[in-house]
Image (spheres, helix red, strand yellow):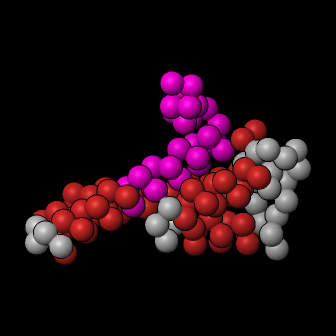
Amino acid sequence: MGGMANILDLSTTAKRFRFIAVLEAITWLALLISMYFKWVEGHKEAVAVPGMVHGIVFVVFVVVAIWTGITLKWSPMVILAALISSIPPFGTLVFEWWAQRTGNLAELSTTPTRVSAG
């Protein structure tokens, strides 16, 4: 339960970013599964709800990524990388892992110094 309690801790900007990044990836998965049911099984309405939910979470991720970048003083290239990460499935997870390793996610990072691209 420690891992789940950890992801639900929204007390800092970096922790809120991580939560939304994971949520965006989960909604991507739901959308991919629903697309299978739409295109393979023929249930045309299968993507309606997952598509809407993913769209909302996508917009929230964009806003949170920009806010996090400003708050944590990311370079414009790191902010751009965060925004681009929302396009491919599970890209937000890859970006979040990279941001932790490179010191861009404050207290979540594994390195003490922040490295910015650009």
Q: Residue at x 37, y 58 (%)?
A: 29
The stretch of residues the image draws in magenta is: 1-28
Q: What number of labels is visible?
A: 0
Q: Residue at x 66, y 54 (%)?
A: 97
- Regarding residue 99, the answer to whether it shows in the image is yes
Residue 5 shown in magenta? yes
Residue 53 on image: x %, y %: 31, 56
Residue 25 on image: x %, y %: 46, 56
Q: Answer left or right for 77 relative to 118.
A: left
Of residue 55 and residue 73, the one placed in the foreground of this image is 55
Q: Answer left or right for 111 relative to 107.
A: right
Q: Residue at x 84, y 47 (%)?
A: 111
Q: Principal SS element in the magenta part?
A: helix
**Residue 94 position (above or below residue 9):** below
Q: Residue at x 19, y 75 (%)?
A: 39
**Residue 1 position (above or below residue 99):** above
- Regarding residue 66, the answer to whether it shows in the image is no
Q: Answer left or right for 54 relative to 49.
A: right
Residue furthest out toward the right? 113
Residue 87 on image: x %, y %: 49, 72
Residue 93 shown in magenta? no
Residue furthest out toward the front? 40
**Residue 19 position (above or below residue 26):** above
Work out which quarter of the rendered image holds the C terminus and state it: bottom right
Answer with the quarter of the image where residue 2 lies.
top right
Residue furthest out toward the top? 1
Residue 69 on image: x %, y %: 69, 58
